[in-house]
Image: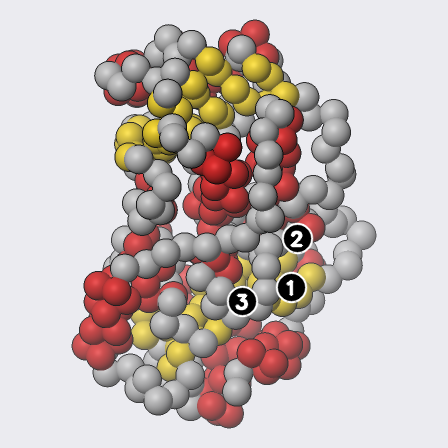
Amino acid sequence: MKIVVRAPNWIGDSIFAIPAIVSLCKNFPETQVWIAAREWVKDLFTSFNFIENIIPLPDQSNLKSLKVSVQRLKEYDFDVGVLLSNSFSSALLLYLAKIPQRWGYKKDGRGILLTNGVSLNNQGNFFHQVHYYLNLISGLGLQTFSPQLSFPLTQEERQQAKNLLASLNVNIEKHIIILNPGAFYGSSKRWPVLKYAELSKLYQDKYKANILIIGSPNEAGLAESIASHSVIKPFILTGKTNLRQLAALTSQADLFITNDSGPMHLANALKIPVVALFGPTDPRITGPFQEPSAIIKKDVPCWPCSYRECPFDHRCMMNIEPEEVFQVSQKFLK
């Protein structure tokens, strides 16, 4: 039997789905389990030895890309397709690819396309996304196992990250602190760059720490703005790493300061200490899943709003002060 798992489309969601994929593989130890994933997240799955192979899917969502995806899945004659993505179009993909068994949550009107649909009625109001995916597995009548996030890296990847730090003249005798000031979702999730710059100065004053800034290419402006307000210039790696290079670089850090975003969960899966700054979203659902981590969130009357851009004064993020973040993070720095 061959199973294909349609992975979620975002970095954080794909990391949250890993325990569910592990459980699925343990239920079918003699079965090939493949992953079908968008180009921008597929590399998250390349080093898990329980995954047979990965089928890349186009990043676009249109009729042409759907046809391409259908043809790619048809080539492998899968017996079962498991949906860890939530959209109607992902269920349509499995249906059009003529996969005999199609399993997933019944939502967004896609129940008619599934051969085994699981209801969402038993979901709690504040279910972490890791358990959301695990509940699908148990809802299918399969056994689930104790959830733990992990992200294996090769020795070569770790060495390449060390070589990169050496090429930048990063002093590895001092703390390496990574700042992640971006958030693809929108500006409402972003802590102001001036506050990141103030926080950076606190670490440099006390620890002489190396400050690295990461992010996607379209977040380069955020990094440059932080640097322009910093007395000691940080190392800017925004837009200069692919996904696995970012993971390897993160594995070398002593501390990861971040908004609610995909790289936050990558650091958490690598068990790097994370301090997560939450604004419009609920950390009970999408916060760091495991230790070592800390969450800073302010209680404001308009929370949670889930707006991409704050229409008011952004008080949920503006009320978080650099000194508070600095103090909370002290337990992670020795």
The CA span between labels 2 and 3 is: 13 Å
Kindly identify which residue carries mark 3: 274
Question: Based on the displayed image, in which of its 4 quarters is residue 214 positioned?
Answer: bottom left
Where disc 2 sits, the SS reads helix
Within 10 Å of disc 2 (Cα), the crowding (few <14, some 14-19, many 20+) is some
Kindly identify which residue carries mark 2: 283
Q: From the top left corner, tell me how far across and down residue 32 is, in percent.
A: 35, 29
Q: Amino acid at mark 1?
A: Ile
Kindly identify which residue carries mark 1: 295
The CA span between labels 3 and 1 is: 8 Å
| Mark 1 or 2, nearer chain start | 2
Q: From the top left corner, tell me how far across and down residue 264 is, in percent.
A: 49, 58
Within 10 Å of disc 3 (Cα), the crowding (few <14, some 14-19, many 20+) is many
Disc 1 and disc 2 in contact, CB within 8 angstroms: yes
In the displayed structure image, the side of residue 138 where residue 167 appears, left or right: left
Q: Amino acid at mark 3?
A: Val
**What is the total number of numbered labels drawn onto the structure image?**
3
- Measuring 38% from the left and 66% from the top, which residue is drawn there? 250
Between 313 and 184, the one nearer to me in the picture: 184
In the displayed structure image, the side of residue 308 where residue 122 appears, left or right: right
**Residue 285 to residue 121: above or below:** below
Where disc 3 sits, the SS reads strand
Q: Amino acid at mark 2?
A: Pro
